[in-house]
Image: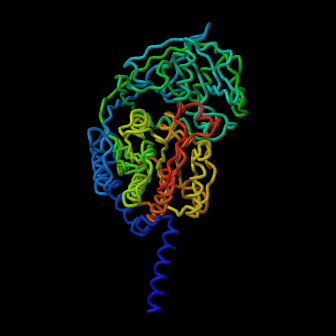
Amino acid sequence: MREAVLLKLKVVAGVLSALVWCGASLAEPLYDAAKSAERVKAHMGFLASDLLEGRDTGARGHEIAAAYVATQLAQLGVKPGGENGGYYQSIALLSFRAADEGRLTVRAKGAAPAQLVFGDDYLPRPYPTAQELRLSAPVVFAGFGIVDKKAKRDDYRGLDAKGKIVAVLAGAPAGFQTEERAYHASIRTKFSVAAAHGAVGVLLIQTPAEESRRPFARLLSHRGVWDMTWRQPDGEYYLPGREAAPLGYISLAGAAKLFAGSPVPLDQVYRDAEAGKTKSFRLPVSLDAELNVETKPLTSVNVVGVVEGVDPVLKNEVIVISAHLDHFGVKEGGQGDVIFNGAMDNASGVATALEVARGFAEGQPPRRTVAFVFVTAEEKGHAGSQAFASYPTVPGRLAAVINLDMPMLTYDFIDVVAFGNERTNLGPVVRRAADRMGVSLSPDPLPQESLYTRSDHFSFVMQGVPAVYLITGFGGDGARAFGAFAAHNYHQPSDDLSQPIDYRVGAKFARLNYEIARDIANDDTRPAWLPGDFFGDLFAKPQQTVKKSPRR
């Protein structure tokens, strides 16, 4: 009898030990990594199959993927969080692109007009504010086009940009903190700042540094790709800086023509840019622009599911788990493999987000409400996440977002990069969860790539919502694997299921994000930006004071 009691005690102790090891509470089921990996494999196998034809926004493949995700949420018992009691948020979209090569002509006093050559000198990038854009105005140069009070930098200081076409350098100087640099490098930021200074048009000037990172020829290869925006409730399409019409990208060769006779030689402009200090001045030229825009209206959906919080106060604060469901569809006019399967981008993110949803559905109910938002049109400018972040379909206030986009599952990560981690009070939560998983936190290894503004979490940041965005890190074999993917598979048909995917890594990544989300959902303290944070000061709206409710 005594031996039987001792045996039972040992079994109970073993169960408790397992629960502590996996970070689960006594009310949660034991975490089975092997079964989780099998589910990640199954989800990715369907979402990245040829049958879904690349899940292009508004296309049949994407709608099938949306139905699949909604069905998975329903099977888990995750409640609908979309419109009209369903899982969908319907979004009216507008695709747009340059209809032809357009025409840009530089005029200087006492010289013959110089027509820029399409493909050699420029690539048009118009907004769909009009099908035909005809513009003629003087040109001014505004450095990188940055206005940052905190950094005491104003590239428009002393420059009259009203009624002018503003030429700004692509990218941002290296002196800024990595995420702030990403914001200043964003073309939408440049458009908005130019519009705020009264500009009527914007030219993006290639620099030698940008040419080495992102050659103009690569930009040119995207000719014909559709951009996308979404229709707001007032009927207007969302177009940041629409008053300053984007005209196009100017190559190094085109810049030489535009800056002919400049009071500051172009070579000096580039040297100043490398040093991070640019001068702003009026160029002795005007520009005639003739651009034509092709548009195509369509509709797509976000998929939204909700696990309701149980705390009477905190349940009105919503933690969002986001992952984009779309990819690039089928390559027009291509030969051979023409389907952009998007296995890593972002079937892996959707699959792991579904595993996070399972954790909440099967575990102890969270104190805060958790919404799972599988957004459309990320690859076309984040239109789906912008629509949801601006007009959420779930009741309550959006309190935080955790974004899952392109976790690399071809190597067992030992570290992660947590974008936004040091900007909010979520940082310690992320670190504790990572410590429990035996994963370290690393700084951004690619600051020049502006990753902080290039995924859906930033749509929430612009609405003042604290955000965390994890990518698998560069430790161990990470740098090699990430580099190989970027060089050969990123945004290519080869991003498919033939890659050496380790689905156990998907289970591990899902568990880490679940640990973070669960801790945020159950914490007494409301997610908030840290005092004086750049993005908090820029975007945060007045918030309620932190409320606490006793644990039961």
Res. 498 in view? yes
Q: Is residue 161 left or right of residue 519?
A: right
Res. 487 in view? no
Expressed as whole percent of the image width and height from the top left, the position of residue 242 reads 46, 21
Eyeballing the image, is 270 above or below 50? Answer: above
Expressed as whole percent of the image width and height from the top left, the position of residue 509 reads 49, 59
Q: Nearer the viewer, residue 399 or 272?
A: 399
Eyeballing the image, is 263 above or below 43? Answer: above
Q: Quadrant of the N terminus?
A: bottom left
Coloration of the structure image: rainbow
Expressed as whole percent of the image width and height from the top left, the position of residue 53 reads 31, 48
In the figure, residue 413 lies in which quadrant? bottom right
Q: Is residue 74 left or right of residue 19?
A: left
> Given the current orientation, which residue lies at the most extreme top position?
110
In the figure, residue 38 lies in which quadrant? bottom left
Residue lying at 44% horizontally and 89% vertically, measured from the top left:
4
Q: Nearer the viewer, residue 450 or 152?
A: 152
Residue lying at 54% horizontally and 35% vertically, measured from the top left:
216
Eyeballing the image, is 499 above or below 216? Answer: below
Q: Nearer the viewer, residue 406 or 384?
A: 384
Residue lying at 55% horizontally and 46% vertically, measured from the top left:
525
Q: Is residue 283 left or right of residue 293?
A: right
Expressed as whole percent of the image width and height from the top left, the position of residue 13 reads 50, 78
In the figure, residue 72 lies in which quadrant? bottom left
In this figure, what is the number of numbered marks? 0
Q: Is residue 100 left or right of residue 171?
A: left
